[in-house]
Image: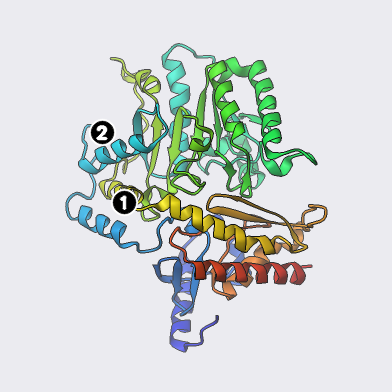
Amino acid sequence: MTMTDPTMLADAALWRTRDLAVLWHPCTQMREHPDTLPLVPISHGRGVWLHGMDGNRYLDAVSSWWTNLFGHAEPRIANAIAEQAQRLEHVIFAGFSHQPAVELAESLLALAPPGLARVFLADNGSAAVEVALKMSFHSFFNRGDTRRRKFIALHNGYHGETLGALAVGDIPLYRRIYAPLLIEPLFAPSPDAWLAEPGESAHDHAVRAAAALAVILAEQGEDVCALILEPLVQCAGGMRMYHPEYLRRARALCDQHGIHLIADEIAVGFGRSGSLFACEQAAITPDFLCLSKGLTGGFLPLSAVLTTAAVYEAFLDDSRERAFLHSHSYTGNPIACAAALATLAIFRDEPVLERNRTTAAHMAQLAAPIGEHPHVAQVRQTGMILAFELGQANSREPLPAAQRTGLCAYRAALQRGVLLRPLGDVLYWMPPYCISADELHHLAQVTAAVIDESTRACA
């Protein structure tokens, strides 16, 4: 798929040089640029495609870090942003309000699981998690329950990179260096079905993990503010997936011990899991629902924390110290709220979830033969999220880490015009919902080819 237009190649090279002279990219060992990990300057996007300055185009199989729902440059969202920018670009949200924020909060509460009553707006997913953690602790404090200072999180979970969010994550690559700066939560076993014993179903493993959570709560529940988890899919932990039964039992245990349940749906919300919100599949309502990424369709940073009337009322008092004083300069940004309203309008006006179910079934059909490869240990899927665990198919043994097979696959896919950014040695599909049958077929062909090539080339 390599283009040879000298002018475009030179232009792309110039932008790479300018970038590497001034920028520091996220989640990247910068020494790997420009050789080991190629930097790809992008000029524009349309639908599922990113168009490079070098003339190549790349199928965005990961929705640009799981944010893009309806395709790049989706005109309805773009137009809503442009129209709002002509009316009100921003206003301080302390003591002031505006139509897009009010309508967005009303719309989110109407769509969310029943029992959620208030919306706090923030800038990004990590900020949403910070808000939920602080609100949970502070609400108990305001009610005089000052003993509760701990949180329970799941092994292999991920909730963001700010210090509070990082503290309740359990991925050593991100957490280890900063451990001296972090609060220390209680970690409960993950319900991840990959960890099931031979012959144990995903449901039964979820029940076993919930029993382990029950033991922790029986011993230390009086000290705990909240349990935080990613419903159904531990995304950054390798797209590990689990049965909804765990959510049902976790909700019951939280109720039994009087603690909050924080559902981090930053990645799995807005249709990714097969339902609008993943919690719906367990028929539960969390005390905090954290949303971001797809909230604006991938256009602008915005997050929302939905919570209950009981939590909100714990802060109502004549004392300023009992108020929730957490703030961000761009809280409730009108342009971001307008983008979110346009995103929700697409869900309202079109059968998005029904189409997603058809697309997800097609994804499963195309992935099945790839799963027969001797170096694919598992194919797993939840809704519009499908993952290939690279390893020994017969033993599930991982491939040698030094081989960096996932990186080999990433580079091979870019050469074929597909963005498949791995999580270690896990390749996954999380494409925009507008992906066509032909585009899915192309994605499957490339995935099969790069798995074969990378497992042989890196062996």
Whether 74 is drawn above or below 144: the answer is: below
Q: Which element carries disc 1, helix, strand or loop?
A: helix
Q: Is residue 365 left or right of residue 312?
A: right
- Residue designated by label 1: 349
Q: Amino acid at mark 2?
A: Ala
Query: Residue at point 63% right, 72% down?
Result: 412
For the C terminus, which image quadrant? bottom right
Discs 2/1, front: 1
Graded by Cα atoms within 10 Å as few (under 14), some (14 to 19) or many (20 or more), the crowding at tag 2 reads few
Whether 22 is drawn above or below 273: the answer is: below
Identify which residue, 260 or 268, lies in the foreground: 268
Identify which residue, 15 or 400, lies in the foreground: 400
Q: CA distance from mark 2 to mark 1?
A: 33 Å
**x, y percent for residue 84:** 22, 52
Q: Which element carries disc 2, helix, strand or loop?
A: loop
Query: Residue at point 43% right, 41% down?
Result: 291
- Residue designated by label 2: 94
Identify which residue, 329 or 425, lies in the foreground: 425
The coloring applied to the image is rainbow
**x, y percent for residue 9:** 48, 83
